[in-house]
Amino acid sequence: MALCLASAATLHAGGLMTNTNYHIAFDRMMARGATFEIDGTYSNPAGTVWGHEGWQVSFNWQNPHQWRNVEATYPNFYNPTTTETTKFKGKASAPFVPGLFAAYKQNRWALSAMLGIVGSGGTVTYDQGVPMFVVPVRGMMATRGLAANQYDLDAWMKGRQFVYGAQLNFAYRISDHWSAAVGLRGNIYDGYNRGHVVANMVPAVQAALGAPTPELLNMQIDVDQRGFGLNPLVSLNYRYKGLTLTGRYEFRTKLNIPNETNTLSVSPAAVAATVGGMAAPYQDKVKTRYDLPALLVLAAGYEILPNLRVATEYHFFDDKNAKMAGDRQKEMTRGTQEFLLGLEWDINKTFTVSCGAQRTDYGVNDRFQSNTSFACDSYSVGLGGAVNVNSHLRFNIGYFCSLYSDYDRQTTYMAIPVSETYSRTNHVFGLGVDYKF
């Protein structure tokens, strides 16, 4: 059983494992790959040499909410001519997602740094479990002659994934039009899988059968996972009058995460012989790959007027060459692609408003998808604004939501045919403050 494998997939914008929204300017505009502001520390490091002279810092707070639901239709084990449908609801949350930025520019060079949650970033809880556990257990109880009202089933699981990143960049203005930057990011993976599947006979049935114990199945899993990886980054910026063209490449981050297994048990012995192998991935010291894929970003920005800017951007995540648990990347048809568009307008010296949109297209198929790690193509829209209190202090506010397409899948669990529909919702609200010294 891949109990909660990667269940806390990214709660923000970005690819399967990678986040791309760290600053509120992204939430309200999205296409930020051609910016010279402080958020360029992540989205356009080479552009920081065209920004504010001296020091600037930024603190950002985001609050995402997401539902990750699986609706399963499977045979009625007591009337094979009919089917049953159950919706398993997974609530994902990350109440406080911070992002910190700092940059210092002097003449032709700039140093910048960023701290943030660069991958995944949240906790997902399924209070009813998921079909891959519940359906086989119900089928197993039916084959043992137990009706649905003769036993109680308690399935629960919770998964958490955070990849914390610390990034440092050095940028240099090569000429009046060109600049380049190199950087390095350290990535710390911190996650866990918790869960249980417990089935017990109701007291009357236990008494009628003379069973010594009500226990039919008791599976308990409690596993922590922690690891570390490094990846270099390079970026290039071209500027001519109101036109800015940029490119950025993040190399793959290798994350090979060992299990720290606190609890792993399946009983009774007769059931363990049937389902015990499903818990094998959670044995102590077993390693799981959670690579962050290489990322290519191409962006263009243009100043239509001194106070009106438009930008477009393209992302390609090389997921097929980033190793995942069970080599699931081999099942992908291609890597993830994103297309972004943004518009920003300075109403006056005090107020700025912006809006943006993003299309995310995953190269997944039925063999890649699973109850605990699935991806749905989406459209995202964002809007918000900024208030320049004075020449030093700016407040940002932003909101974006993602509109996902449902994904339909046909599969089997222990030879039981199941039709599944995966669905998601996502809303992110954020506040931030920028300060220039």
Image (cartoon, rainbow, N blue to C red):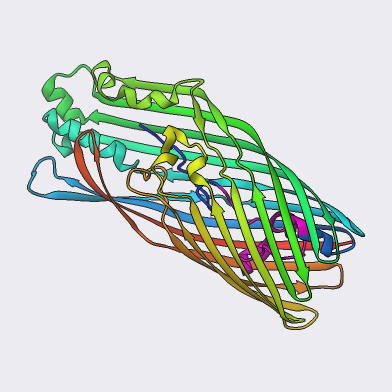
Between 154 and 402, which is closer to the camera in this rendering? 402
Task: State the image quarter where residue 247 is shown.
Answer: bottom right
**Res 31 visible:** yes
Task: State the image quarter where residue 56 is shown.
Answer: bottom right
Between 175 and 205, which is closer to the camera in this rendering? 175
Q: Is residue 28 magenta?
A: yes
Look at the picture and state if 345 lies above or below 364: below
Task: State the image quarter where residue 280 is shown.
Answer: top left
- Residue drawn 54% across the image and 50% down it: 317
Image side of residue 269 versus residue 247, left or right:
left
- Residue drawn 16% across the image and 29% down it: 204
Question: Which residues fall within the magenta stretch?
Answer: 18-46
**Res 8 visible:** no
Q: Position of residue 250 (x, y in %)?
A: 65, 47
Q: Is the C terminus in the top left, top right, bottom left or bottom right quadrant?
A: bottom right
Q: Position of residue 129 (x, y in %)?
A: 35, 41
- Residue drawn 12% across the image and 22% down it: 209
- Residue drawn 75% across the image and 64% down it: 238
Q: Is residue 190 magenta?
A: no
